[in-house]
Image (cartoon, helix red, strand yellow):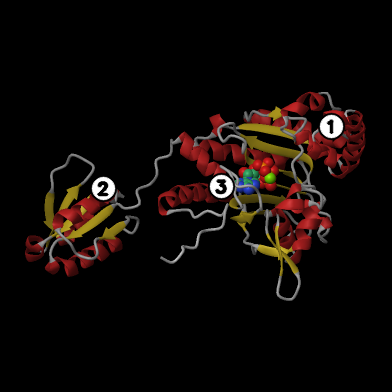
């Protein structure tokens, strides 16, 4: 036998029994972002490698070891996008969407990172990203967080999620803090793991993010970022908290929340859960006031977040509180060769009259009992049965498969009226 070709590790097929949940989630998100006045933007999945190096940062995990980078045929270095913000800003600059105006954008699509695949962590995964440009106040930060909170409520996930909040303050304040933190950690270097020692020079703030229990104590006693906040950033943070308090959105101030990408300043936040094991962050974001300029645009404040759809789907499966829509409402059984042509006519009539119904026509013939079994397995609410008798009298038998109701036979022209109760 010929050897089968398999999918690439960490790049998943989403199979038909899962796509219903995905579509439902995507629709809820589409409605949500529209509800807040955001417009969709679609960017290519491949960009110049330089874009991610310059935005995400050379010494981040993503750029150092997670990118799918390859040489194009002419030698250009290209990369499959590991996230969307950099592309969104690139596109915004390129098409003049950000200059001297406010702009609220969102996108959805696959991202690629070469990580060790495990539950909730894949090499191709999907994010929804939401970005707002041209606004520097805490009101937009707050509104974005309210939008995410509303999403969790709609999905029934709010009880499983905690909002963690921090401020990375200004670049100058962060530089001062970085110095103090590095000095402290150097003085306790023997308590750091290898990875953290390596980061002492390159990215010391990321050490705060370490989950290594052996380092818990040394990190707990480290200097705190909030002690170095500049006064504008402190006010921004306090106002953001006031907005959240006013809206009844609960949060915890996590002094060690720093995020893994270099472009953030001031507000950073994550929604985390303990229901997904180690992959606990489902949504993360913050302010990146310097990025537009860093990528060649005019200085433009910006804030945004991204959420991982695979992790949300896993949570929805856990919570199991979501009634998935039926994939088939009506299954049409054509018993006998003479029924096949009228069955197709009936199917099309029902689709004309009730376009929101999902109508599956039995194709390929076969015994009546077998067809009825297929109808049942399809999950349909109703089977429309067309056999020799029905054809002779221009009628259709309506059989409710999920409820206790008498089977009825109606005239072909009345089928849609009977089915309209399903809509
Ligand atoms: P983590 O700490 O879990 O590695 P991250 O900080 O690298 O996450 P971001 O770059 O902030 O993640 O991406 C935003 C969201 O995208 C994450 O919160 C998560 O839900 C999702 N995500 C990131 N990487 C992956 C991945 N490899 N597989 C599935 N989802 C992912
Ligand atoms: Mg990561």
Quadrant where the N terminus is found in the figure: bottom left
Residue 414 location, quadrant: bottom left
Find residue 123 and report its horizontal and vertical position in percent.
61, 52
- CA gap between label 2 and label 3 equals 30 Å
Q: Can you tell me whether the CB of the residue at mark 3 lies under 8 Å from the nearest atom of ligand 1?
A: yes
Looking at the image, is mark 1 or mark 3 earlier in the sequence? 1
- At label 2, counting other C-alpha atoms closer than 10 Å, the crowd grade (few under 14, some 14-19, many 20 or more) is some
Residue at x-position 17% and y-position 62%:
366
Q: Secondary structure at mark 2?
A: loop
Find residue 280 and report its horizontal and vertical position in percent.
62, 36
Residue under numbered circle 2:
381
| Image depth: mark 2 or mark 1 in front | 1
- CA gap between label 2 and label 1 equals 59 Å
Residue under numbered circle 1:
225
Residue under numbered circle 3:
309
- At label 3, counting other C-alpha atoms closer than 10 Å, the crowd grade (few under 14, some 14-19, many 20 or more) is many
Residue at x-position 64% and y-position 64%:
44
As drawn, 191 above or below 332: above
């Amino acid at each position: 036998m010929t050897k089968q070709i398999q999918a690439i590790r960490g790049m998943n097929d989403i199979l038909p029994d899962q796509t219903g949940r995905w579509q439902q989630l995507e629709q809820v998100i589409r409605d949500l972002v529209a509800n807040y006045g955001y417009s969709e933007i679609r960017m290519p999945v491949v960009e110049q490698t330089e874009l991610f190096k310059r935005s995400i940062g050379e010494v981040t995990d993503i750029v150092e070891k997670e990118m799918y980078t390859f040489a194009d045929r002419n030698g250009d270095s290209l990369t499959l996008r590991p996230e969307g913000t950099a592309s969104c800003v690139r596109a915004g600059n390129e098409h003049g969407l950000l200059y001297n105006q406010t702009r609220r954008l969102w996108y959805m699509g696959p991202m690629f990172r070469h990580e060790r695949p495990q539950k909730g962590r894949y090499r191709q995964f999907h994010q929804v990203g939401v970005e707002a440009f041209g606004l520097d106040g805490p009101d937009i930060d707050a509104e974005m967080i309210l939008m995410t909170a509303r999403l969790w409520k709609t999905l029934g996930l709010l009880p499983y999620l905690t909002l963690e909040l921090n401020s990375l303050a200004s670049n100058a304040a962060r530089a001062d803090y970085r110095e103090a933190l590095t000095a402290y950690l150097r003085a306790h270097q023997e308590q750091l793991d290898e990875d953290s020692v390596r980061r002492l020079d390159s990215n010391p703030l990321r050490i705060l993010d370490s989950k290594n229990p052996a380092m818990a104590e040394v990190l707990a006693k480290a200097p705190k970022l909030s002690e170095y906040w500049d006064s504008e950033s402190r006010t921004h943070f306090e106002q953001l908290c006031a907005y959240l308090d006013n809206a009844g959105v609960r949060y915890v101030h996590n002094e060690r929340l720093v995020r893994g990408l270099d472009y953030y300043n001031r507000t950073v936040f994550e929604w985390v859960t303990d229901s997904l094991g180690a992959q606990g962050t489902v949504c993360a974001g913050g302010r990146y006031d310097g990025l537009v300029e860093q990528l060649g645009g005019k200085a433009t404040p910006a804030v945004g977040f991204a959420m991982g759809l695979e992790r949300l789907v896993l949570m929805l499966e856990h919570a199991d509180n979501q009634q998935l829509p039926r994939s088939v409402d009506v299954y049409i059984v054509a018993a006998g060769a003479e029924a096949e042509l009228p069955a197709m006519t009936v199917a099309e009539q029902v689709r004309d009259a009730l376009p929101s119904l999902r109508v599956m026509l039995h194709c390929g013939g076969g015994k009546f009992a077998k067809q009825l079994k297929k109808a049942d397995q399809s999950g349909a609410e109703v089977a429309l049965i067309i056999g020799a008798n029905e054809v002779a009298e221009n009628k259709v038998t309506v059989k409710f498969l999920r409820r206790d109701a008498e089977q009825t036979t109606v005239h072909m022209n009345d089928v849609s009226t009977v089915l309209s109760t399903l809509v």
